[in-house]
Image: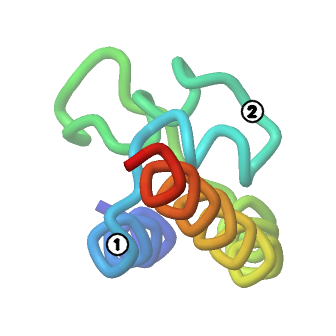
Amino acid sequence: MTDHANALRAIVAAHGLRYRDVAELALVSVKCVEGWLASPAAASHRPVRERDVLLITHRLPEWLSGRGQIAAMKCDKAKTAE
């Protein structure tokens, strides 16, 4: 496993990201993310490029803040419905 794949796995674990979240951040398909995170022995494995990890880390703070705002809005709607 490459250092880039390890970095991506660490980001995914640290923030509880799903494959579709990573795909959105990296501007790629979910299939691509599945290849990145597949075992290196798997036929579907694809190497993670440094620029993809950099793009994810660059976009992540804004994406996380947006996700937090959405979660807060859902919570507020639930409180007003009570």
Instruction: Mark 1 or mark 2: name the one nearer the start of the chain.
Output: 1
What residue type is disc 2 on?
Val
Considering depth in this image, is 71 or 78 the residue closer to the camera?
A: 78
Find disc 2 in the rendering and name its residue: 28
Would you identify the image quadrant in which residue 17 lies?
bottom left
Q: What residue is rendered at 52% in x and 46% in y?
A: 47
In this rendering, the answer to whether 38 lies above or below 3 is above
Local crowd size for mark 1, using a 10 Å CA cut-off: few (<14), some (14–19), many (≥20): few
**In the image, 62: left or right of 36?**
right
Task: State the colouring used for the structure image.
Answer: rainbow
Find disc 1 in the rendering and name its residue: 6
Element class at badge 2: loop
Residue 81 drawn at (x, y percent): 47, 44
Q: What residue is rendered at 33% in x and 77% in y?
A: 10
Local crowd size for mark 2, using a 10 Å CA cut-off: few (<14), some (14–19), many (≥20): few
**In the image, 30: left or right of 14?**
right
What residue type is disc 1 on?
Asn
Considering depth in this image, is 55 or 81 the residue closer to the camera?
A: 81
Nearer to us of marks 1 and 2 is 2
Residue 16 drawn at (x, y percent): 32, 64
Would you identify the image quadrant in which residue 54 lies?
bottom right
In this rendering, the answer to whether 27 lies above or below 67 is above
Would you identify the image quadrant in which residue 24 lies?
top right
Q: What residue is rendered at 36% in x and 18% in y?
A: 44
In this rendering, the answer to whether 67 lies above or below 26 is below
Gap in angstroms between the C-alphas marked 1 and 2: 18 Å
Element class at badge 1: helix
Q: What residue is rendered at 17% in x and 33% in y?
A: 41
